[in-house]
Image (cartoon, helix red, strand yellow):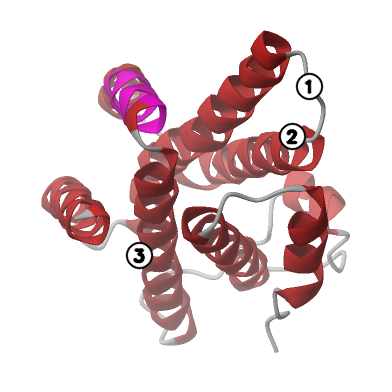
Amino acid sequence: MRDVFAKSMTKFFRFIADTFFAKRYGHRAVVLETIAGVPGMVAGMWLHLKSLRKMKTGWGPQIREMLEEAENERMHLMFFIEIARPNWFERLLVLIAQLIFWWFYFIIYIIDFKTAHRMIAYFEEEAVISYTQYLEMIENGQVENVPAPQLAIDYWNLDTYAKLSDVIIAIRKDEIHHRDTNHKFADEKLNVQNFKDLKNSIPEEK
């Protein structure tokens, strides 16, 4: 049931993204990365409050991982704002989408955190597919391979002359990590030790 719900929500949000943005991947990324920054913050906040309520330690690694994920997605948004230059309608859409998704995900996380993480893992799988398609469009000349924003160069320590394609590759690598992390969180209730095992088990993109 968890898997069915997670996949159905993923298909629904993919349909919305395809309907509004089609192949306009830069503008699509602005809205989606705004939403993508929500789950990590919700999870980190809830685990933090859970630790306070129970007056126990042990959730530190999970809290930090989730907050780092939220921050990473926030930085993705900052890069695409410089690239896509969203208009007023897209900025309004971002505000509405964030408000709706925050409460939607927060409720799901309280009810069943494993379903919540599984859904985000599937979201990240879709993100990897979308960024791969975006990269193919750049390589085929359908999208101009503009210089990478300085913010992205500094964030990933990219080459001074890095291009948009380099940014997409770096973002896709981040999304692969988020995908694997959320699948792992959905599979088991992590403690400190198996969280360390997770860190060592996630493969790097070749």
Residue corresponding to mark 2: 59
Report whether 129 appears left or right of 12: right
Q: What's the magenta bit mostly, secondary-structure-wise?
A: helix
Q: Nearer the viewer, residue 164 or 69?
A: 69
Q: Which residue is mark 3?
A: 126
Q: Give 56 or 25, whichever is nearer the viewer.
A: 56
As helix, strand or loop, the secondary structure at mark 1 comes to: loop
Q: What's drawn in magenta, residue-wise? A: 100-110
Is residue 82 shown in magenta? no
Residue depicted at 36% across the width and 37% down the height: 112
Among numbered discs 3 and 2, the one appearing first in the sequence: 2
- Which of the pair 122/151 is nearer the observer? 122
Residue at 53% in and 45% down: 80
Which amino acid type is marked by label 3? Glu
Q: Secondary structure at mark 3?
A: helix
* Residue 67 located left or right of residue 8: right
Q: Residues within 10 Å of mark 2 (few under 14, many from 20)?
A: some
Specify the amino acid type for callout 1: Lys
Residue that appears at 60% across and 59% down: 181
Q: CA distance from mark 3 to mark 2?
A: 28 Å
The answer to whether mark 3 and mark 2 are in CB contact below 8 A is: no
In this image, 15 relative to 60: left or right? left
Secondary structure, mark 2, is loop
Residue 3: image location, x then y, percent: 25, 60
Q: Characterize the local packing of mark 3: few (<14), some (14-19) or many (20 or more) Cα atoms within 10 angstroms.
A: some
Looking at the image, is mark 1 or mark 2 nearer the viewer?
Answer: 1
Q: Which quadrant would residue 70 be assigned to in this image? A: top right
| Residue 56: assigned label | 1
Residue drawn where x is 44% and y is 48% of the image: 117
Mark 1 vs 2: CB contact within 8 A:
yes
